[in-house]
Every structure is written in structure tokens, then in C-alpha cells.
Amino acid sequence: MRVTTKGQVTIPKQIRDHLGIGPGSEVEFVATDEGARLVAINENLSEEEASRKFREVLDKMEGTLDLCGMTTDEYMEWLRGPRENLDVG
């Protein structure tokens, strides 16, 4: 893709369809270490549609984290490091 003299780019149809981007949709470009990321702003989703999309994301993530047999508490301690007693007496 090339950027026009006005700073415009054409988002490929496959990407527009995948992200639900149509005329009047808002998008945002977010700088990353790798370059930039296109984010579709879906403010007008119904609660049902937003819930469905969120469930799809969660379903894709299911089973992707292997705790190697640790309990949740053991994993949190491993992740955060040992915690000192926080009691304020």
C-alpha cells in the first residue's frame, strides 16, 4: 500500500470485512514497537453483539495458558513475586 499526498491509505477489503469497517466507521492507528496497529472503534455495537464478540475472543484464548500444574495462587506468586504481609496494624 502507498500513502497518498493527503496521508490516506486504502484498507484492504478482506481486513475491512474482518473488522466490520464500513463507510463512516472510525479507526485508530496505534504506534507499537513493531510499527503501527489499526484498531477499529466499534462504539455502536449492541450489547448482544459486543457480548458475542467478547465471547469469541475468550473462546480463542481458552487453553492458551499452561500453568505447568501450578494453582492460581502459586501462579500469581510466581508472576508477582512473594508478597509481604500487608496488614497495617
Image: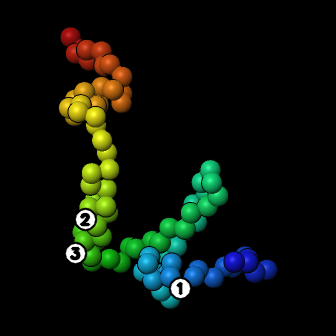
Is residue 74 visible in the rendered image? The answer is yes
Measured from the top left, where is residue 16 in percent x and y? 49, 81
Of all residues, the one furthest to the right in this rendering is 5
Looking at the rendered structure, the kind of residue marked 3 is Glu
Q: On the picture, is 28 further left or further right than 34? A: left
In the picture, which quadrant includes the C terminus? Answer: top left
Q: How far apart in space, not on screen, are marks 1 and 3 (Cα)?
A: 25 Å
> Residue at image x 45%, y 71%?
41
Q: Secondary structure at mark 1?
A: helix
Q: Secondary structure at mark 3?
A: helix
In the picture, which quadrant includes the N terminus? Answer: bottom right
Residue that label 3 marks: 48
Residue that label 2 marks: 55
Measured from the top left, where is residue 46 in percent x and y? 27, 77
Q: On the picture, is 7 further left or further right than 70? A: right
Is residue 24 visible in the rendered image? The answer is no
Q: Earlier in the sequence, mark 1 or mark 3?
A: 1
Measured from the top left, where is residue 37 in percent x and y? 56, 63
For residue 80, which quarter of the picture?
top left
Q: On the picture, is 82 further left or further right than 11? A: left
For the residue carrying disc 1, how many other residues have a C-alpha within 10 Å: few (<14), some (14-19), or many (20+)? few
Looking at the rendered structure, the kind of residue marked 2 is Arg
Residue that label 1 marks: 13
Q: On the picture, is 86 further left or further right than 5? A: left
Q: Which numbered disc, 3 or 2, marks the residue closer to the eye?
A: 2
